Amino acid sequence: MTSQDNSGTETQAQCDRAAYFRTIAFVLSILLGGTTHVVAQEYSHDVSTWQEILVPALEDSGEREVWDLASDYSMLAWRVYSDNGKPAATLVPQPSKNTVKEPPFDAHAGRFSSPTEYWKVDDGYLTAFNHGEFGAALYWFSSNGKQHYRMSYDHVQAFFVIGKDIYAIEGMNHMSLSCGSVIKIAKQGVPHRWKVERVAKLPWAPYAVVTKQDGTMLLALSNSLVEMGADHDVHVLIDEAPWESLYPSSAFLTSDERFLYLGMRQFVGEVDLQTRQLRMLVPNAGFLNKLPEDVEQRLRRDYAPKPGQSYDRSAKSQHLPGTLCDMTAADARKSHGRVSYFSGAK
């Protein structure tokens, strides 16, 4: 193994250890009284009236760990939407992506059930089963549900259209693995069946997508915000975004295409696309999740920067050699979808 490989392995191990200690800290917080969640209270749906909550800098590792852990375990999640062209948000039970009416039948295929996304087409429904590390698949179902066939084993996060073409973002962020791509879904060949074409790989797993009038995609990835045009080149707008464990699942772009709003756990993110500035918003500070004070103090102490040491929070690799990111279509077929993620099947 080369020194470069060793370095990558050590970095991954550091990330895994940090995740382990974060879990221990949360368990301790439960044993010592639990996190503090807000009670039901009135709030304005008008996001323009909301309060900004500053995100501690990565260099301030103790405060950042407190912020991350409290946000990660918040019981609140927001969905953003347009209220007469203005950004608005409402509380939802959990980050939710399914925004279309469900088919009038119980969609299940083989071992897959409980679909997570649907898209109505002229001859039925494109139906996604995305169960994270437990497997995923993309199927077509007839309008009455009596016929179906599998198109791929993709982890579809959301469908969207550009012009008359149907696309989807797919991928998964799990432990030290973060992969994704944009796929196009169209009828091809004889017989005329729906098929998947992978048009672009993404550097990280995608969470949410919205398109500009010219078809440019704005994609919230697991740790960044990127845009991708017709040339399928990916341009980073915001790197090291603080929402990896907050899972943005809804997006709203203002009519002038200046501001992007992302609904996620705990916060609504507001991105000024001109200045590339991000603000994390809540109706007021009373909506913030809080850790017990002694747990906060322990995290500040344990994660305080030490001379000569640093924790690379962006060390997760999107394509670790030999991982499921590099599985082929044949590998996926052999596993019958029992894979965490693969990016090669068509």
Image: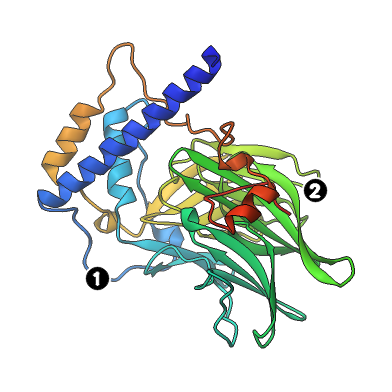
- 25 or 235, nearer to the observer: 25
User: For the point 39% across and 54% down, which residue is it?
Assistant: 267
For residue 230, the mark is: 2
- 167 or 144, nearer to the observer: 144
Identify the image quadrant of the C terminus: bottom right
Kind of element beneath mark 2: loop
Task: Looking at this view, name the residue that lies furthest to the right.
Answer: 190
User: For the point 74% across and 39% down, which residue is it?
Assistant: 233
* Amino acid marked by disc 2: Ala
- 175 or 267, nearer to the observer: 175
Kind of element beneath mark 1: loop
Contact check, label 1 and label 2, Cβ < 8 Å: no
Measuring from the top left, give residue 253's x and y in whole percent: 61, 58
Identify the image quadrant of the N terminus: top right
Other residues around mark 2 within 10 Å, as few (<14) / some (14–19) / many (≥20): few
Question: In the image, is residue 6 above or below residue 142?
Answer: above
* Amino acid marked by disc 1: Ala
Q: Visible in this render: residue 294?
A: yes
Other residues around mark 1 within 10 Å, as few (<14) / some (14–19) / many (≥20): few
Specify whether 61 is left or right of 297: right
Specify whether 116 is left or right of 65: right
Q: Quadrant of residue 238?
A: top right
Spatial CA span between label 1 and label 2: 45 Å
Measuring from the top left, give residue 187's x and y in whole percent: 82, 68
Read off the residue under disc 1: 40
Measuring from the top left, give residue 107's x and y in whole percent: 57, 79
- 119 or 176, nearer to the observer: 176
Measuring from the top left, give residue 222's x and y in whole percent: 51, 45
Q: Visible in this render: residue 224?
A: no
